[in-house]
Image: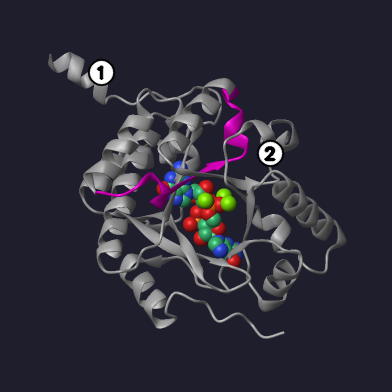
């Protein structure tokens, strides 16, 4: 029995995708412990309707306050985590935390949905949809309060099973969005087959607005295409009023970025939200 338990607890890695340096392995090895010891937390960043400034929801972003290395950005560990079965542990943690936080906020009258980043590996995991449904049930929340963000490139791992699992999510009314849109390579080919409500245009394009003609064309085309398919568009990485105004002008639906707020710990986020009464003051023309 102990051996069986050990086998379940053990973490399997996909070989040859990335080279695991000793340092990386050490970091991954301490991740489960880090969760138990409260080193892992979520920050929240608002998403805002461009037209009105109304807050649409918040994205939960993982943070690791490492006792020796200090605060680690997700880039320092998530790429490795996503290539191992550890991603199930992280996603479970993020979902539980975000949903529990949202339940508290809703009780306090701050009724906004929360978005959690998940990996394709999660979608291919048996009974993932049931797990999510169970969590929502436990906290008496509807599926439509939860948004799941899936990175574009990641969608390509196993298209058919991914679509199947996404459909199961949408049956629960969960909102699905494609993250980092424009950084994958076959978006147009599969976009119409995915049951998604939102695309998030990658910051690499948004940052270059409104001066860069190439970025302008790409963002305008993405907005037009998405709207024709009944999909809403959010721009990530909105850092200044000029970008905000440009996006509003071309009819992009939502914005997220440092201009509105940096990602904040839950309490600071609630303070930010109350201070602006749930509506961001749109920069003047
Ligand atoms: P993402 O989901 O595309 O998240 C957006 C990233 O852009 C966040 O970085 C956010 O802090 C940053 N950002 C937001 N506004 C601006 C801006 O105006 N300017 C700039 N320069 N950056 C901005 P962060 O928090 O470092 O997260 C990086 C990535 O790590 C995320 O990209 C996501 O792919 C991944 N990640 C974060 N949390 C989780 C998680 O719980 N699970 C999984 N699987 N991945 C996560
Ligand atoms: Mg995201
Ligand atoms: Mg993104
Ligand atoms: Mg990203």
Q: Is residue 35 magenta?
A: no
State the residue at coordinates (43%, 39%). Answer: 24
Task: Report the magenta residues as a range.
Answer: 140-159
The quadrant in which the C terminus is found is bottom right
- Is residue 48 visible in this depiction of the protein? yes
Secondary-structure class at tag 1: helix
Q: Which residue is mark 2?
A: 184
Residues at circles 1 and 2 in contact by the CB criterion of under 8 Å: no
Q: Position of residue 51 (x, y in %)?
A: 63, 71
Mark number displayed over residue 7: 1
Q: Position of residue 6 (x, y in %)?
A: 21, 21
Q: Position of residue 132 (x, y in %)?
A: 34, 38
For disc 1, the neighbor class at 10 Å (few under 14, some 14 to 19, many from 20) is few
Q: Position of residue 64 (x, y in %)?
A: 36, 54
Secondary-structure class at tag 2: loop
Q: Is residue 52 left or right of residue 265?
A: right
Furthest residue toward bottom: 284
């Amino acid at each position: 029995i102990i051996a069986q338990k050990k086998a379940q607890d053990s973490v399997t890695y996909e070989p040859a995708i990335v080279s695991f340096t000793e340092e990386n392995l050490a970091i991954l090895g301490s991740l489960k412990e880090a969760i138990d010891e409260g080193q892992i937390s979520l920050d929240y960043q608002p998403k805002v309707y461009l037209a009105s400034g109304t807050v649409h929801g918040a994205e939960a972003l993982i943070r690791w306050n490492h006792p020796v290395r200090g605060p680690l950005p997700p880039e320092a560990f998530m790429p490795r985590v996503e290539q191992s079965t550890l991603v199930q542990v992280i996603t479970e943690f993020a979902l539980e935390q975000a949903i529990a936080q949202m339940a508290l906020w809703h009780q306090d009258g701050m009724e906004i949905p929360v978005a959690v980043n998940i990996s394709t590996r999660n979608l291919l995991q048996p009974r993932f949809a049931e797990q999510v449904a169970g969590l929502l049930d436990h906290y008496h929340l509807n599926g439509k309060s939860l948004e799941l963000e899936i990175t574009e490139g990641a969608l390509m791992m196993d298209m058919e099973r991914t679509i199947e699992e996404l459909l199961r999510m949408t049956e629960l009314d969960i909102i699905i969005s494609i993250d980092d849109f424009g950084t994958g390579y076959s978006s147009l080919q599969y976009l119409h087959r995915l049951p998604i409500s939102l695309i998030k245009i990658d910051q690499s394009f948004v940052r270059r607005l409104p001066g860069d003609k190439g970025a302008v064309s790409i963002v305008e085309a993405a907005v037009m295409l998405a709207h024709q398919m009944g999909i809403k568009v959010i721009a990530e990485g909105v850092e200044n009023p000029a970008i905000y105004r440009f996006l509003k002008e071309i009819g992009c639906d939502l914005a997220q970025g440092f201009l509105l707020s940096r990602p904040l710990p839950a309490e600071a986020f609630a303070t930010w939200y109350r201070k602006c009464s749930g509506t961001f003051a749109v920069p003047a023309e």
